[in-house]
Amino acid sequence: MTGLSCTAQTVKLDYYFNHETRKVANSQPERFHYLWTETDEPGYSKWGNWFKQQGFSLDTLGTAPTAANLKGAAVYIVVDPDSKKESAAPNYIQQKDVTVIAGWVKQGGVLVMLANDSANVELPHFNLLAGAFGMHFNNDLQNHFIDDAHFEDGAIYITNNPVFPNTKKVFMKDVCSISTTGSAKALLKNKKGFTVIAAAKYGKGTAVTIADPWLYNEYVNGRLPIGFENDKAAQDFISWLKKQISVQR
């Protein structure tokens, strides 16, 4: 076997490009937003627990990706890279980062990129990475509505979808759309026909784009009305990711 070892099935969550902080009572900054350990609404603790239930171990990457620190990871997740609105000194994705990550995917890694609507994510540099795999986060706003009385405006109905075989209805609010070229294909579209999840094979690996941070605690199913199945979607998605992991790497 060459390349990455898939025996541990480690899922590594980026803490470098997304590094939001806030001041707490003692005025010291603390990390928040899309963390494995974060159990309140903006955290990924529920998603992380479902990964563990399916045999993954959780890890984080607090520095720029390199061939060495990605080695051994089966899945690498990059979510909502910081803009200057979110960080005084954001770590933008650079071409050298794209080269490293693309090389890792080519050897069998599974990359998941989760964006946001264009007002709440740094898209130009993120698109350097997505573009390496034939995908592009568009500068638009989809599934927009104002208050909780309009949850149905964020509904996406699912039928005969190989990624989400056990899921019939999911929720996404205030997302961008995704364009695809080459071998990249849409995996899920909203009610208006805009792509919100896409993927591409790249060498031995797979790259996935999602138009929203999506699977954080608030919406799996912390605040969703009965009928929405983001919790099922999260677990279906993990199962699908497992199938993308290359055996021979």
Image: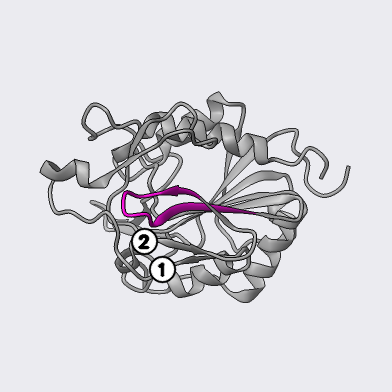
Above or below for 93 versus 39: below
- Residue sitting nearer the eye, 23 or 103: 103
**Residue visible at 61% across and 34% down in the picture:** 57
> How many neighbours does mark 2 have within 10 angstroms: few (below 14), some (14-19), or many (20 or more)?
many
Image coordinates for residue 119, horizontal then vertical, percent: 30, 68
Which mark is drawn over residue 224? Answer: none
Q: Earlier in the sequence, mark 1 or mark 2?
A: 1
Report the side of 42 relative to 130 (left or right): left
**Residue visible at 31% across and 71% down in the picture:** 85
Q: Which residues are magenta?
A: 187-200
Report the side of 158 relative to 134 (left or right): left
Q: Is residue 28 visible?
A: no
* Residue position for label 2: 176
Above or below for 173 versus 134: above
Report the side of 184 relative to 21 (left or right): right
Which mark is drawn over residue 138? Answer: 1
- Residue sitting nearer the eye, 5 or 194: 194
**Residue visible at 71% across and 33% down in the picture:** 8
